Amino acid sequence: MLLAFATLASAAGVATPAVANQSVVPGTFPLANQPRVMDGRIYSLDTRGNSVVVGGTFTRIRPGASGSAEINQARLFKFDVSTGQIDLTFRPTINGEVEGVRYSPDGTSLFVAGSFTSINGTTRNRVAKLNAVTGAVDPTFNPNVNNTVKDLDLSNGRVVIGGKFRFVGNQTRERLAMLDPTTGAALASFDLAITDSRYEYGPYVQELEVSDDGRWLVVGGNFITVGGQTREQIAVIDLSGATATVANWATDRYRPDCASVYRDTYIRGIDISPDNTYFAVNTTGAFFGNQSMCDTAARWELPPALTGSQLQPTWTAHTGGDTHWAVHITDAAVIAGGHQRWENNPNPSPGGDNDGPGSLVRMGIAALDPWTGVPLSWNPGRDRGRGVEAMASTPSHLFVGSDTVLFNNQIRQRLAVLSTSGGTLNPPPERLELPVDLRLAVNGRLYQTTFNGTAFTPLTQVSGAPIDANNWNDVRDGYVQRGQLTYFGPSSAFFRRSMAGNSYGTPTNLSTSVGYVDNDRDLTPYDQPYGVAETVAATFHQGRIYYTKSNDTRLWWRWYSIESGVVGAQEYLSSGANWSPSRAFDVAGDWLYVVWNDNTLRRAYIRAGGAVDFSTLTVVDNGVASGIPWATVTAMFSTQAPGGPIVIPPPGALNCTNPAQPWKAEYYANRTLEGGPVTQRCEADSINYNYGTGAPAGTGLGNDNFSIRWTRTLNLASPRALRITGGSDDGIRIRVDGNLVIDDWFDRGYAQRTVDTATLPAGDHQIVVEFYENGGDARVLATIQQL
């Protein structure tokens, strides 16, 4: 009855406890006085103050002190992290695996879920509520779930479960349900069936997570449909209303197959950020190329920042062929557990299950930069086994549960507890706005001028002979973040040095010091990522390095971690235009400033997703009024100047209103329409292109591995049906007003088919045609006829 006038996100009778978050990356040494789990696996962890509860498949535990006697305690136990003391008054007996455990908001109860059917001799099928002090079964809470529950979480006190079940008591609930926290009854306000499986396996929920504010539920598993809407392996549920609804959030990035042994689902871990703005997904599946989501960790923005269909991740981190299991997000890091050997490994050589240029050893666990997905310096290492399948944190500790014994070369059977005392800060990217203090390298000397977007103060030399011993010819180009000048320098390497005003510390060679590995291949200098040695002009914006290369005319971007100094190994095309005249880069606001070789300074707009719009490239200064010899500038970087911010307005979006060119065409340097388009333009009414084995002219794309999206508005003077023909080599899909009418999104030789829509009302209708090319010949056809 309460839900008739209160939202799901706020209706609980008790307050949700404050988010227990970490502002630093914890230390790497596991505490010695914490409990040991002597067999089995840990599947779930939760905390309340100093109390920690552990669930899994184990049967034996013992105190941390060497020589302590083992305790027969199966599948669930509690301990106090401040002392490491196991709670011997909490001794429930459970006859099956515990896969999920959560404290109630007031800390007096524990909700547990799994495959069990009995606790303390009392029948409790798969979900139970226990007294958090004694372990006694709550007599009034009895959901009676008919099959395995794979995961459990709370939304402001209410219990959310997912798994293989179809009934909660006598109520039909297809694999996902929300339970009354007092009785365990399935709530009528939450009834979103998980149906339609991948291949021959029955549908089920593998993982779920509720945001700390109770607003969002993210579920992953073997399914195609959630609440009657297409959602492939991953779905976002909105809990803010009186009735739960499937959010306007969908992606098809988890549609393609991984290895055949993961034909049901390759989702393995989900967590939502403490600020409720994004979530991370971990997967298994083997290596299927760096445009696949197999064996990755990925960041996805939650609504309202990201809504719609065909959504793309903010970043994707590749292991090169090993599974990521549990994922846990703090303010400082995205902790990815599993049985991985490497991170930052999108190009394993000669193929999957090998390291590759730019990869770093991260045995079984890694801390990824929340903003970029690039590995942080944190690297305790553990024996890999099956992997880390459970993590939790408090402001003072990180808890890691697995199936193995060693953590950072210390014997810590299956449970590692790490302290945040003395932890490492991970600063977010620093954003610069006009005005800036601009440094220009000219003939080995460094000069400074203050720039407000239109005018410059007189140049003043600030470094180089005769002021100091710095030779600025050694800097190819670079940028300043958090008091560190980071730059591409001599010997094909990448460097960082402290910067205070115009005093510079001793350079550190990041190419040789961060730990890149590419055993036995030596494809790049120092085993660093592809493209570092060839970088010419470079700058930094919102976690991305933008750069040109000596062996390419186009503009590229890649991720970077300020904390670790690691360069992301995956390269993304930012613009397919000819950027070879550029000599140096800098960024202020959302504009890329470019020193051009015709003695001008220009700027171009940086659009969402990393694309720099070459069509917005305009001259800011020709050197006459400023007196700056732009044609001799070899490097450029800036720091924030006082005043401002001065904002240069963004350019307008591309609108294709000419009837002769009604299609807005966006070209992407990948098969998944990911990131920003490297080229966009208005095109003719007819989509009928045979690219052969080449690339679309004037786009800067490679001959293979690209995708295109065409969008237009079609006005119907009267109600009409449409006859739509789509043909492709490789994949094509066509939507009318967001509804998919042709979906042939797979590799194939050229084929086409025609479909008729239902009668559409008079007025404007949006038509979207999407195409991708994998390899070989490429051809696309799309025609629209009014019936």
Image (cartoon, grey):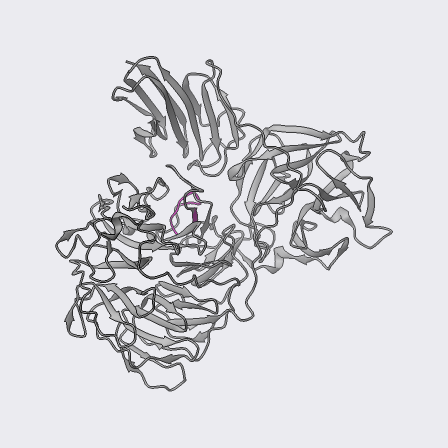
**Residue projecting furthest to the right:** 466
Q: Is residue 295 magenta?
A: yes
User: Residue at image x 46%, y 62%?
Assistant: 21
Residues drawn in magenta: 289-300
Of residues 564 and 80, the one nearer the viewer is: 80
Depth check, front residue: 214 or 443: 214
Q: Which image quadrant is residue 476 in? A: top right
Disc count in the image? 0
Residue 592 appears at what percent x and percent y? 63, 37
Q: Residue at x 44, y 64 (%)?
A: 20
Residue 768 in view in this figure: yes
The vertical placement of 49 against 537, above or below, is below
Q: Is residue 548 left or right of residue 682?
A: right
The residue depicted at 77 percent of the width and 53 percent of the height is 502
Q: Give left or right: position of 152 versus 348.
A: left
| Place of residue 237 in the rendered image (x, y in percent of width and height, measured from the top left) | 32, 47
Work out whether residue 747 or residue 543 is closer to the camera in this orientation and state it.
543
